[in-house]
Image: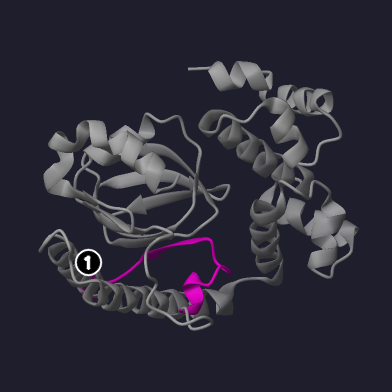
Amino acid sequence: MDVTRMRDILIPHLSQIREHAFLNSEIGMVRGDHTVFSLLMRQRPPFTINDHRLGIIMSGEAEINFNLQDRHLKSGTLVYIGPGTIIHPKRLSPDLRIFGMALFTNFPMPFAQGQMPSAFNGQVRDFQLPVSEEDIATATHIMDTIWQTVHASDDYHRPTVTALVAAQMHHYDHLFHQQADQLASSRSREQTIFDRFLQLVTQHCAEQHQIGYYAERMCLTERYLTTVIRQTSGTTAKDWIDRALITRIKIELRHTDKSSAQIAEEMHFANPSFFSKYFRRLTGMTPGEYKNYG
């Protein structure tokens, strides 16, 4: 979901959300209003996110699937969603309030090539950080200053905004690595393998449907990888690949004008007939039925 799609969704409701949202070709912001998320929920998830998004859960709760993993978000959590993330909101509480921003592809990122804080360099697709009240206060203060700056004039001072965005990204990056280091000390080798496998699957499932590819990328035997994935997650490696692939197909069917034949070709199926049979076997519907459903 990019800026064009966001604009299409939000503009008809602009008078309703004007005080709580900001949107131009470079940056979008939401400040505490539930309406925006209710509108997005009506757009038939799942979605793929095509930009960097940073948010603060101010109140309420949400059940959201990020990159095939269910997450429970609550007040006091910092959230990052990166390009390529598959997101499927399942439940949003009525009192959910989020203060967040989206950095669209036109946004002048405040880092030289190779200098992006490592939490945002593409190795991590998403993260959720329960943090202290002090860390939430810092993030909120930075976000609030960005909000005030973009509203100061139609032609806001971009160097100020990019510097503030850099500060926020460094704040998130510091907290991410702080918690990652703590988790690493208690995480088993098997859990680390599973996490890496799932990361690769969400990145490459459209082109790579076979377990052997992922085993080779991870320098493991196929047998060992399948054993670890089943023991760690209770689900087979092939099932995880199918879940990721079906989710990608659903996104293409619902949110693009591509034909089934085009999707089949792009996702490396032998032919449209095989693609249709595969989709129907796993969903109970043909691609055409799913596209028109609901």
Residue 64 image offset from top left, x and y in percent: 44, 45
Q: Is residue 15 magenta?
A: no
The residue under the point 37% across, 52% down is 73
Instruction: Please name whichever residue, 12 or 56, is drawn nearer the observer in this view of the structure.
Output: 12
Residue annotated with mark 1: 143
Quadrant location of residue 58? bottom left
State left or right for residue 217 relative to residue 172. right
Q: Residue furthest front?
A: 155
- The answer to whether 159 is drawn above or below residue 148 in the figure is below
Quadrant location of residue 224? bottom right
Residue segment shown in magenta: 117-134
Residue 188 visible in rendering: yes
Q: Callout 1: few (<14), some (14-19), or many (20+) C-alpha neighbours within 10 Å?
A: many
The residue under the point 61% across, 38% down is 247
What's under tag 1, amino acid-wise? Met
State left or right for residue 117 relative to residue 192. left
Q: Is residue 129 magenta?
A: yes
Q: Quadrant of the N terminus?
A: top left
Residue 5 image offset from top left, x and y in percent: 40, 40
- The answer to whether 74 is drawn above or below residue 175 in the figure is above
Residue 228 image offset from top left, x and y in percent: 77, 59
Type of colouring:
one colour
State left or right for residue 228 relative to residue 3. right
Residue 155 image offset from top left, x and y in percent: 17, 63
Circle count: 1
Residue 235 visible in rendering: no
Please tell me whether mark 1 sits on a helix, a strand or a loop: helix
The residue under the point 32% across, 69% down is 131
The residue under the point 20% across, 67% down is 146
- The answer to whether 293 is drawn above or below residue 161 in the figure is above
